């Protein structure tokens, strides 16, 4: 049995674990990164077709306008992104015995993909990490709090000698693994707090019950026929429920042609028809796009079969629209030594790659080395006070800005998504004005660089703007409920939870962009 001491142990080498490990290495902190699989990336899974085309069998897209962490990381790493092909048409099949219907609709909303597939992101991040910091094929089986450190027990592949056990003693531990998997596969001593156990149980694993099919071709014949590649199939016999153009770049003749789809069958149905799945996929694609669609190279991946992705509870209680960001999963436990990561623990972007990066940023702050606290200079304290005063005035007038924007929309005969657009427009105006204020204030940011690309002045300077959007939305909802004009629009007067969630997601994206822009201004003042 091997025994090793380390300052920080990160368990789970998906996007969250890799992004966190990169920061720890850049800071010079002592850590080890463990992964149960024999590969890095977690749910980011790439394959190559026989012709060499890169295929994404896990997450495929990111949305730069709504996902600032992803957009910033991809730009920083110098990776090549391109827009998802979406010519604005979609096929619909509601009856297998009837012809398909075509309508005008854009589906992907500004989504982008990576040249070479999302595995390029994994390759780029892991390239920063020394191999001696990585431990593949290490399955965590037990966590024990022994006081000064946590003891981790791993089952790992010993080659010809069979499974061996490795024991790690770590002062701090990050479990960047879906919570339900930890609950089912890891023994915790002493037992975890009941509230934490309930939060883990109530957090579905993103993608756990999904299956994805990709069919590659020599050419994108559907584009030549005037189709976008987008299709929705909604009948009881559907094999693929949502289909999309999966070509490897903007020019399929150079990057490779493919169609992709998400299985409409549940896991039990997929298992029952397992041997016939290839034929069923080919048949449905040919129904939609003609005979050439049947003659491709099929790649099919079922995430239910991934023991390090799908928990038993995920199969028993699949969730179509899971809720993430359980407060218990963002706290530290075992005396501050145990932290939880993975996209499912994110307060924003949960389930997406953006959520994995959001969780990684939270953990980066929690694990930051202790710094000697330097008092603010008189000049910076004065600038922060001036900015806080300005922000207070804006907070008081924010609802008036929303009402003005709403009135302009109503006067212009706008009728769709009134609250959403009015909130975002007014919030955008205030954030832009705040950035101008920051640029004009004479901060002395020399020596304030906390780590590459981040100023330690950013949190105290922007603190007065924290929760600005949340407070505004609460006031807006109260106003809408009492507004005679809005009473004519039931969806705005009493908005549904899905609509509110869309608004909150857009507000968060605006906030993150504002924080990054504000930090850039302070970094410029430091140079």
Image (tube, helix red, strand yellow):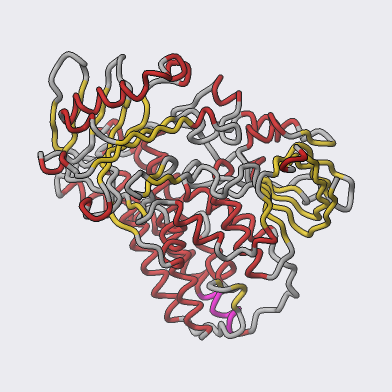
**Vertically, is 327 above or below 117?**
above
Residue 302 covered by magenta stretch:
no
**Vertically, is 214 above or below 395?**
above
How many discs appear?
0
Query: 91 or 515: which is nearer to us?
Result: 91
Residue 493 shows in the view: no
* Quadrant of res 460: bottom right
Q: Where is residue 44 shown, x and y percent of the image?
A: 48, 46
Side of 82 relative to 168 (left or right): left
**Vertically, is 495 above or below 28?**
above
Query: 310 or 363: which is nearer to us?
Result: 310
Tell me which segment is drawn in magenta: 379-386
The residue located at (55%, 46%) in the rendering is 346
Residue placed furthest toward the front: 160
| Quadrant of the drawing holding the N terminus | top right
* Quadrant of res 129: bottom right
The residue located at (59%, 77%) in the rendering is 449
Side of 201 relative to 163 (left or right): left
The residue located at (60%, 50%) in the rendering is 13
User: What secondary structure is the stretch in magenta mostly built from?
Assistant: helix
The residue located at (58%, 55%) in the rendering is 18
């Amino acid at each position: 049995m091997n025994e090793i001491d380390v300052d920080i142990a990160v368990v789970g080498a998906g996007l969250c674990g890799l992004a966190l490990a990169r920061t720890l290495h850049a800071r010079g902190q002592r850590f080890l990164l463990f992964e149960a699989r024999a590969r890095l990336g977690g749910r980011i899974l790439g394959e190559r077709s026989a012709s060499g085309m890169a295929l994404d069998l896990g997450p495929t897209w990111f949305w730069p306008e709504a996902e600032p962490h992803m957009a910033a990381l991809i730009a920083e790493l110098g990776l090549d992104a391109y827009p998802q092909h979406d010519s604005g048409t979609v096929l619909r099949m509601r009856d297998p015995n009837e012809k398909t219907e075509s309508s005008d609709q854009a589906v992907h909303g500004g989504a982008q993909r990576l040249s070479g597939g999302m595995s390029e992101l994994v390759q780029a991040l892991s390239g920063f990490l020394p191999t001696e910091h990585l431990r593949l094929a290490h399955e965590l089986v037990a966590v024990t709090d022994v006081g000064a450190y946590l003891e981790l027990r791993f089952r790992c592949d010993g080659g010809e000698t069979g499974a061996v056990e490795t024991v790690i003693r770590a002062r701090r531990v990050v479990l960047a693994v879906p919570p339900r998997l930890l609950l089912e596969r890891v023994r915790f001593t002493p037992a975890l707090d009941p509230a934490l156990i309930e939060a883990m149980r109530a957090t579905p694993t993103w993608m756990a019950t999904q299956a994805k099919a990709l069919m590659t071709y020599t050419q994108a014949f559907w584009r030549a026929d005037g189709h976008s590649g987008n299709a929705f199939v909604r009948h009881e016999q559907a094999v693929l429920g949502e289909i999309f153009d999966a070509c490897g770049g903007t020019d399929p003749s150079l990057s490779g042609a493919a169609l992709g789809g998400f299985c409409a069958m549940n896991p039990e149905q997929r298992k029952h028809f397992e041997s016939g799945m290839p034929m069923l996929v080919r048949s449905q694609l040919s129904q939609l796009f003609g005979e050439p669609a049947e003659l491709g190279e099929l790649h099919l991946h079922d995430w239910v079969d991934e023991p390090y992705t799908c928990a038993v509870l995920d199969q028993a209680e699949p969730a179509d629209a899971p809720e993430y960001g359980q407060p218990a999963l963002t706290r530290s436990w075992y005396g501050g030594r145990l932290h939880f990561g993975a996209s499912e623990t994110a307060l924003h972007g949960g389930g997406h790659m953006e959520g994995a990066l959001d969780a990684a940023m939270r953990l980066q702050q929690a694990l930051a080395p202790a710094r000697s606290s330097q008092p603010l200079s008189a000049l910076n304290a004065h600038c922060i006070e001036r900015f806080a005063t300005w922000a207070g005035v804006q907070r008081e007038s924010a609802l008036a800005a929303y009402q003005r924007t709403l009135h302009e929309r109503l006067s212009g005969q706008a009728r769709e998504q009134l609250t959403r657009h009015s909130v975002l427009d007014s919030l955008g105006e205030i954030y832009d004005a705040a950035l101008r204020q920051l640029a004009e204030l004479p901060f002395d940011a020399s020596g304030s660089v906390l780590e590459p690309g981040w100023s330690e002045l950013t949190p105290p300077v922007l603190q007065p703007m924290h929760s600005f959007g949340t407070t505004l939305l609460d006031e807006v909802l109260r106003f809408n409920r009492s507004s005679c004009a809005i009473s004519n629009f039931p969806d705005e007067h009493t908005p549904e939870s899905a609509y509110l969630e869309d608004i909150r997601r857009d507000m968060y994206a605006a906030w993150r962009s504002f924080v990054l822009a504000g930090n850039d201004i302070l970094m410029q003042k430091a140079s």
